[in-house]
Amino acid sequence: MRTTIRPTRPTLTVGTLLALMAGPGVAQQPAGLMADLLRDVSQVQEKLVGLANAMPEANYGWRPGQGVRSVGEVFQHVAADNYLIPALLGTAPPASTGIKADNYKTVQDYETRKADRATIIADLEKSFAHLKKTMGETPAAKLGDEASFFGQKMTLQQAWILATTHLHEHLGQAIAYARSNGIVPPWSRSGN
C-alpha cells in the first residue's frame, strides 16, 4: 500500500489576512509586551473611570486624613501622570493641561486645581487616551532604548512597566476610598 502525501495549503488567520491587506503604510497594532501592557492599562482605565462615575460628587472632597489626597485629587493625580510619563519620554501633553516635563510644579497645579466631578472624569478619560496612544506608538525595537525618568536612566520598557504598576497602585487606593465611603466597585456588584 502506497501512501500519497499531499502538501497542505497554508491557512491564514483573520488577523494575518488583515495585516497583509493593511500594507506597509498602515500603522500596525503593538504586539508582545506593549500589547499586554496596553490591555492591562485599558482594564485599569475601565475600573478607575467606573469608580470615578460611581462616587457621588459630594464625596470628591473626602480624604482619609489630613495631608492625604482627596478622592478627586487621586483621579486628577492619575490623569496628571498619564500626561507626565509620556512627556518624560518625549511626547508632549496637550497644551491645555499646562503640564511640562521639566517643571513638576505644573503637575502639582494640575492635580490640585479646582474641578467638578464631570470635568475630572472627562480629564481622566482624555489622559488615558493620550497615555495609550503614546504607549501604542512605542515600537518593540525601541523598548531597550534608554531615557531619563525622574532623574534615573531606565529603558522605555522599564518606564512603561512603571507607568502601568503606578496605575494599579492608584486603582487600589481608589477602591479603598470608595469602600470607605460605602461605594461598591461596579465590577464587584452581584451579578458581575
Image: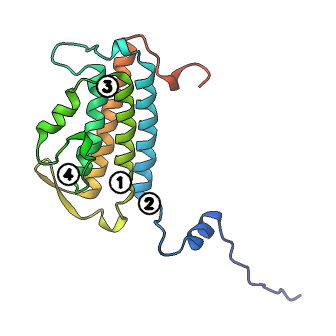
Q: Earlier in the sequence, mark 3 or mark 2?
A: 2
Q: Name the residue under label 1.
A: 135
In front of the other: 90 or 94? 94
In which quadrant is the N terminus drawn?
A: bottom right
Disc 1 from disc 3: Cα separation: 24 Å
Assess disc 3: are there few (<14), some (14-19) or many (≥20) residues with their C-alpha within 10 Å of its C-alpha.
some
Amino acid marked by disc 3:
Gln
Q: Mark 3 points at which residue?
A: 173
Q: Name the residue rendered at 34%, 28% in the picture.
A: 120
| Helix, strand or loop for disc 4 | helix
Discs 1/3, front: 1
For residue 48, what is the image quadrant?
Answer: top left
In which quadrant is the C terminus drawn?
A: top right
Amino acid marked by disc 2:
Pro
Assess disc 4: are there few (<14), some (14-19) or many (≥20) residues with their C-alpha within 10 Å of its C-alpha.
some
Q: Earlier in the sequence, mark 1 or mark 3?
A: 1
